[in-house]
Image (spheres, grey):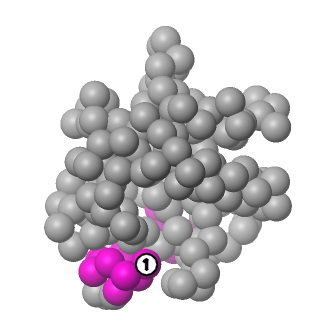
Amino acid sequence: MATGDFLTTERLILRPWTEADLDDVLRLHAHAEVTRHLPGGEPWTREVAAENLAGWMRHYKTHGFGKLKMLRREDGLFVGRAGVAFMEEADAFELGYTIAPAFQGRGYATEIAAALARWFLTSGVRDRLIAISHVDNAPSRRVLEKIGMRFERNATLASLPCDVYAMGRGDLPE
């Protein structure tokens, strides 16, 4: 299904998932430090990883974008996942990212989140984008604020206490 890169930044590449990427998805979500702020809060089983991978691939096939595989440009190492997908519970398109523990703290989340927000808000899909951050995930909230998203409200989404951030086309930096 992957036919090339979806989005490229200075240090990162986003590309569509394939079924062959299941082990990367499983490795990324095998860490409690990665999954503690995600629905379920527990490391993913192979079955859960496969279900999510299939869902991301369906979303990409349907919409032409979604949650994508993130690689480091310099050496092709798997860094995590990031993208924009429709979140039914919030009735909005949601920006999300998950960075592998070995790559956290290097600015990758900010770099990819900013690029995705710009792409989405200038693509004509919609003129509003949200992001959801678990109330205990201060690093994620800092990323959202750095890219210009504004706190909108507290909510419970996917059974998690969350802060909802939003951004419109007019909020993009020049």
- 148 sits left or right of 75 in the view: left
The residue under the point 81% across, 32% down is 3
Residue 27 pos. (x, y %): 43, 34
- Write down the region rendered in magenta: 156-172
- 160 sits left or right of 23 in the view: left
Residue 136 pos. (x, y %): 17, 67
The foreground one among 38 and 87 is 38
Mark 1: few, some, or many residues within 10 Å (few <14, many ≥20)?
A: few
Residue 14 pos. (x, y %): 59, 36
The residue under the point 50% across, 62% down is 95
The foreground one among 25 and 114 is 25
Quadrant that contains the N terminus = top right
| Residue 121, placed above or below residue 65 | below
Secondary structure character of the magenta stretch overall: strand
Q: How many marks?
A: 1
The foreground one among 170 and 11 is 11
| Residue 30, placed above or below residue 47 | above
Amino acid of disc 1: Ala
Using the rendered view, name the quadrant where residue 19 is placed: top right
Magenta-drawn stretch contains 171: yes
From the image, tell me which residue sits under label 1.
Answer: 158
The residue under the point 63% across, 71% down is 86
